[in-house]
Image (cartoon, grey):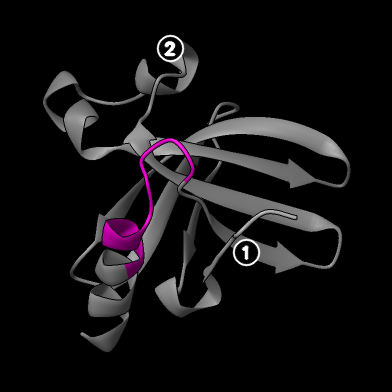
Amino acid sequence: MKSIVLLLLALACFDAQAYEMLLRDGRNVVRLYEGPCVHAGTLGMLKPEMRDRFRKATAIFNGKPFYACWTYEEDGPKVFLLYEDGDQQRYEPSRFKPDHGV
């Protein structure tokens, strides 16, 4: 529950345009945005009734960029990501930190 509260507080503290939560794992990076998911290919993999629950995400794995959509699974609790290539991943919310830029 603490992870849920922390993630929601972080979302509330940032402007929708500037908001990012960041996970770094070596050279790999996953960014979560507050705004809605807009990547048509990824949205096309979701049931229409689920699309409004998903937010924009981007990732870089081994130097290759990916678009993704993310949502918060409360029964986990986990951050669930669906990538444009169909891959799926779940992360602990506590692994994401606010990204304040440079």
- SS for dot 2: helix
Residue at 62%, 64% in the rendered image? 23
Label 2 environment density (alpha carbons within 10 Å; few <14, some 14–19, many ≥20)? few
Look at the numbered discs 1 and 2 and tell me whether their residues touch, using CB distance below 8 Å. no
Task: Give the magenta range.
Answer: 10-18
Left or right: residue 76 versus residue 32 is left
User: Which disc is residue 23 wearing?
Assistant: 1
Q: In this view, does 24 lie above or below 67?
A: below
Amino acid tagged 1? Leu
Horizontal and vertical percent position of residue 69: 43, 36
Residue 53: say if magenta.
no
| Residue type at numbered disc 2 | Ala
Foreground: disc 1 or disc 2: 1
Q: In which quarter of the image is the C terminus?
A: bottom right
Q: In which quarter of the image is the N terminus?
A: bottom left
Residue 40, which numbered label?
2
In terms of secondary structure, where does tag 1 sit? strand
Question: Disc 1 and disc 2: Cα gap in Å?
Answer: 24 Å
Q: Which of 27 and 48 is in front in this view?
A: 27
Q: Is residue 27 left or right of residue 23?
A: right
Q: In this view, does 21 lie to the left or right of 36?
A: right
